[in-house]
Amino acid sequence: MKTLTTTIAVLLSLFASAQIQNWINIPETISGNSIDLNFHIDSVQMFPGAKTQTLAFNQYSYLGPTILLNKGEDVQINVENNIGDTTNVHWHGLHVSPENDGGPHTMVMEGETWSPLFTVLNEAGTYWYHPHFHGKTGAQVLRGASGFIIVKDENESALSLPRTYGIDDFPIVVQSIQYDEMNQPMPLGMQDSTIFVNGSRANYGHEANLNIPAQMVRLRLLNGSGERTFNFGFTNNMSFQIIASDGGLLNAPVNATRIRISPGERYEIIVDATSMEGESFSLMSFGSELPSGIQGGPTMDMGGQGPPMDSPINGIDFDILHLHVIPATSDAILSISTTLNSLTPFTESAANMTRNISMNAPNMMSMDGPFTFNGDSFDMEVINQEIPLDNIEVWQITNQTMVAHPFHIHDVPFFVIERDGNLPPVFERGKKDVVLVQSMETVKFITKFETFADTVMPYVYHCHILMHEDDGMMGQFIVTPLSTNVNEPEVEKSIINIYPNPAQTSITIDVPSEIINVDFHIFNSLGEVCLQGTLSNDKIDISTLPAGVYYLKLITNEKRYFVKLIKK
């Protein structure tokens, strides 16, 4: 939406105009041991007038293909940056080492290709990918830069479940975005109200449509919005079954008529359309049932303490996707397995420690932040938590603000064990990596920090409301090895020696004699190149740089080396 006035005018005009029907796109899949992602600039005619400038992957003008992975396989993903800006890509929910995670410390410059290589360790489930460059995450994601990751494994493949991609198994990403007068997305806007399903507009005179067969159908629901929480359900309160959360399958299907999904969360649901051939019904958001304080619920008037959550679709119920039931396929799944998984959460008695994380604002009534963790805004140079490898920990997250925040942690999935001292709902007891913490609520989860340790490269945790994350609601942690040779970073740090560091006027770089040509780039924390060239006489003059923290990248014929550099 552009302005509230414009939106109201559009709404009124709908009474006199026909709905435009959009049949949503089901992204094509890519798979294999080497996957190429061309991250590029594009544009789409989303509204009358100026085209909307977008970011996308491969052949798409908006969003990207679905990456299919198999548990246990090795995969290299080659991300080519053609967006005219520094970026990266985070594999949201995947358990990978910090140098492959695509967090804020990974900086992929324009024209470069980043090629993380890792073994798929996750269970079957629905994950996703999106940029995670600090300060620019919202601007890049809300221009369309994201896509699905689907992991398969032997357990899931043996179950009676719909899994024919695009036939009875559908990836569904729902986004809510605010646009300015020039039809460009506003990552800092709180009047987000233009709904998209798989990149197709779904409101204000537009209908998003999908054909499904008259059988059991699987919908993989992802909330890809910057801040809006959806309370999903179907017309006529039709029931469905929840079979999976962020980190994979639940132990058994859970019957429901609603599923609340905050930004970054994923849930897989089964819709029973076996006796509905020829009928149509809608996936809806029941915003009227959400409490105030959650973006998507009723507007909260704070009496001048900050901008209200005043999107015109807050606190109302509306259609998102129209589903039309067509004849069943020849190999239809007509019933699903009643046992799906055998998850056993860690017990609190097994925990090595409890960490307390508070969500704070400048004053408790503030609606626009800046929001922080434990009173600290994100600093690339500060490690907020140090965690020994294989620690089992309870994290207690207390929200001391008036706004609900979806808490996301990289590296490991967790089990929610308490909400304000009570057991979480059954559908929330599977593996998670995002949990919505409401105002004045305390949520406890338990997890194990296993497999990867790195004394240099951190992981992060953050609010998945993108404007909050970019504004500093993020912290970082390192997982420390139990010994010096356990899961150390794969980078050969000892080959090239750099000194002094910190430095004032110049640095010296000792390079082995077999390395002939070395190019260098020095860039700041915003990813802006400050100095570049070819190494000469083993020295780089840094006297013109202002004091601060920089990142030095050395490029040889075969390798690239990253070093943090401090200019005094």
Image (tube, rainbow, N blue to C red):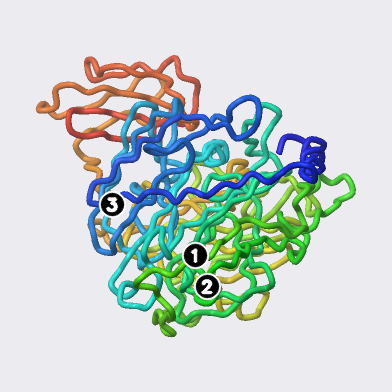
Q: Secondary structure at mark 2?
A: loop
**Residue pointed to by mark 3:** 31
**Relative depth, front residue between 114 and 2:** 2
Q: Taking 2 as reference, is 411 left or right? A: left
**Relative depth, front residue between 153 and 110:** 153
Establish if 440 lies above or below 369.
below
Label located before the other in sequence (2 or 3): 3
Q: Kindly indicate whether the residue at mark 3 contacts the one at mark 2 (C-beta within 8 angstroms).
A: no
Establish if 465 lies above or below 95.
above
When asked about the image quadrant of residue 418, the answer is bottom right
- At label 2, the amino acid type is Ala
Distance from disc 2 to disc 1, alpha carbons, whole Å, reads 9 Å
- At label 3, the amino acid type is Ser
Q: Can you name the residue that lies furthest to the left here?
A: 514
Which x, y percent locates residue 28? 37, 49
* Residue density around tag 3, few if under 14, some if 14–19, many if 20 or more, within 10 Å: some
Distance from disc 3 to disc 1, alpha carbons, whole Å, reads 29 Å
Label located before the other in sequence (3 or 1): 3
**Residue pointed to by mark 1:** 326
**Residue pointed to by mark 2:** 273
**Relative depth, front residue between 40 and 52:** 52
Q: From the image, which quarter does the N terminus lie in?
A: top right
* Residue density around tag 1, few if under 14, some if 14–19, many if 20 or more, within 10 Å: some
- Looking at the image, which residue is at 38% across and 37% down? 59
